[in-house]
Image (cartoon, grey):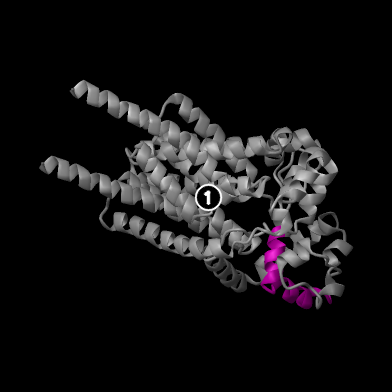
Amino acid sequence: MINTQILRARLTDTRSVWAATIAIPLLLLAPAFWNGYPLLQWDTGGYLARWYEGYLVPSRSTVFGIYLHVGEDSSFWLNLGIQALATLWILQLTLRVLDLARPARLVAISLALIATTALPWIASMLLTDIFAGLSVLTLFVLVMCGAKISTLEKWILFVFTAFSAATHSATLAVLLGLCCVGWAMRPWLGRPIPFAGLALGSLTIVAGAAMLLAANFALSGQLAWTPGGYGVAFGRMLQDGIVTQYLRDHCASQNLKLCPYRDELPPTADDFLWGHSMFDTLGRFEGLNDEMGFIVVRALAEYPAWQAEAALAATARQLSSVATGEGSSGWLPHTYGIIERYIPAQAARMHAARQQRWRLDFTAVNRIHVPVAFASMVLVVMLFSRGLWQRRRDDITLLAGTVTLALLGNAAICGVISGPHDRYGARIVWIATFVVLLAAAKALSARDADELAGC
């Protein structure tokens, strides 16, 4: 009878695993299925065009462009399938290394994330955002839990983390920052941060950088980093009023192209860089990149207090900018144009999607997502602070600390360099919700174990 019960339990678990394996990826892609086509964003076209145009453009990774090109023949459903399955695998792997692996628990946590965070929306979108949060989790598992995973899993995590770093400079910077903190804290924490794991995690950053340089060389013939750093930073300084002040202070003595426009600059970086402004008139990045770099460097030196104040304000605003759906409205002319020009066979399907008929509205969604995001950030910081206060070095405390640092690093990097945007917050804040759910599951699991021991 005992053997029969064991066999029935194992059969039930097997069925649950298969049900979760099928249901969770489908639910993660529910927005795309509802839309009738993968979700697009303002920046999607810029990534997609890299394969066809053969030159580098600011802030558009060629690695991600190649990744999109691989899925073209499937109308990009291959890309979405990879994103959904990778998400499922990483969620269950994190549960497993924390000794929380149960099919029912995986389903419950996944459904909670799908219902209350941006996760299904970014998994359904042709954009680098899904890799920002997932790579923080994979780096944690690779560094902290290497003894609990197989050699094959280590290699898969290594490649995935390196690829994620290569898809966006901000993602690479966040991962690099986490590794630097790990090396700095290791003398004090010791064993909780294994040397071999931290070294392997750090090598993923090197591999990601090499991957990006190789892709840039393969597509453009240039062994160069993706351009645009100065231009993006210039846009943030313009938005803060620093550029206008610099021009007013120096146009009398410096012959700058922007001087005639110093009193006509747009109010935001997006208006300047991507709208119809004097930036187009003066040759965009090709015509203004050197001048923007010159102004950025000089303005940093001349207004240090202002820059520091603006940086702190931008970081704080970025932390509070977490709404889902930014840049995913029905008017995406550049992305439409790229698809129509280079993949005309898909133009009809793209235009028939609900998103392109203005049926995508995130107002109701954000009534749930934004409060959950704020609550999750507060709770994950509390989890980390409590662990520090009690001098605990358990997995949940270390993961909460990793996520807290990732959120702060992401806010500082994106807010200070690019300026605050909801998209930058929404793409990573869901991992805070995941950690809170893991902590709750861990507490319930410990309570059940205590009750069982008492019996």
State the residue at coordinates (83%, 65%): 276
Q: Is residue 206 visible?
A: no
Image coordinates for residue 2, horizontal then vertical, percent: 18, 24
What span is colored magenta in the figure?
232-253
Graded by Cα atoms within 10 Å as few (under 14), some (14 to 19) or many (20 or more), the crowding at tag 1 reads many
Query: Is residue 112 magenta-colored?
Result: no
172 sits left or right of 115 in the view: right
Residue picked out by circle 1 = 119
State the residue at coordinates (64%, 43%): 167
**Depth check: 128 or 347 in front?**
347
**Depth check: 295 or 311 in front?**
311
Quadrant for residue 283, please give it: bottom right
Count all numbered tags in the image, as a single digit: 1
Image coordinates for residue 263, horizontal then vertical, percent: 81, 78
Query: Is residue 233 magenta-colored?
Result: yes
**Depth check: 14 or 162 in front?**
14
439 sits left or right of 201 in the view: left
